[in-house]
Image (cartoon, grey):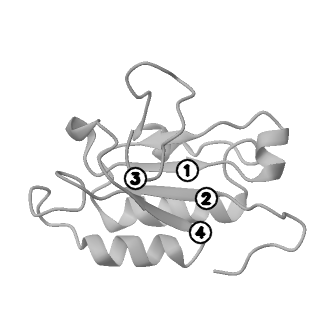
């Protein structure tokens, strides 16, 4: 992943990989390939359970410094269980992500608000 020189803090992607997400419970998904593909475009951190197991696999796209300055907030995406969805996330991150590029209509189908907050940030290592 090559960071854009004009953006000192690019979009970051948090991928839940714990009890449900990234496990054999979500069948038909190459979890390792999904993680590797996302890491080609953005810094990726793997989190323990984000406590939204009913949305497995969960991916959170956090805005870049420029996106946050423009009002962008983390976008939670659930049920990301096919390679096309991962490609849509990669394309959005490449375009600038939250606050810089509008959420593509197709990703709007995956977007959800985690319990308790519409602006919740995932915490490394768990909720």
Image side of residue 60 versus residue 31, left or right: right
Q: Residue at x 60, y 69 (%)?
A: 42
Q: How far is mark 3 from mark 1, CA to CA?
A: 16 Å
Earlier sequence position, callout 4 versus callout 3: 4
Rendered image: mark on residue 61: 1
Q: Nearer the viewer, residue 108 or 73?
A: 73
* Rendered view: 73 above or below 14: above
- The extreme right residue here reads 6
- Mark 2 and mark 1: Cα distance apart in space: 6 Å
Left or right for 14, reference 32: right
Asked if the residues shown at circle 2 and circle 1 are in contact, with their CB atoms under 8 angstroms apart, the answer is yes
Q: CA distance from mark 3 to mark 2?
A: 15 Å
Residue occupied by mark 3: 125
> In front: 71, or 91?
71
Tell me which numbered mark, 1 or 4, is placed earlier along the sequence: 4
Q: Are marks 3 and 1 in contact (CB under 8 Å)?
A: no
Which mark lies nearer to you, 3 or 1? 3
> On the rendered image, what quadrant is the C terminus found in?
top left
The residue mark sitting in front, 3 or 2, is 3
Name the residue carrying label 4.
43
Could you say where residue 126 lies in the image, as x and y percent from the top left? 37, 46
SS of the residue at dot 1? strand
Callout 2: SS: strand
């Amino acid at each position: 992943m090559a960071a854009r020189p004009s953006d000192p803090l690019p979009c970051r992607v948090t991928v839940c990989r714990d009890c449900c997400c990234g496990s054999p419970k979500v069948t038909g998904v190459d979890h390792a390939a999904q993680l590797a593909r996302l890491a080609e475009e953005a810094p990726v951190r793997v989190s323990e359970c984000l406590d939204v197991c009913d949305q497995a696999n969960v991916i959170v796209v956090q805005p870049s410094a420029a996106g946050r300055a423009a009002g962008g907030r983390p976008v939670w995406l659930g049920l990301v269980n096919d390679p096309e969805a991962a490609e849509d996330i990669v394309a959005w991150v490449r375009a600038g992500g939250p606050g810089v590029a509008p959420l593509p209509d197709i990703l709007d189908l995956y977007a959800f608000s985690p319990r308790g907050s519409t602006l919740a940030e995932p915490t490394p290592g768990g909720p």
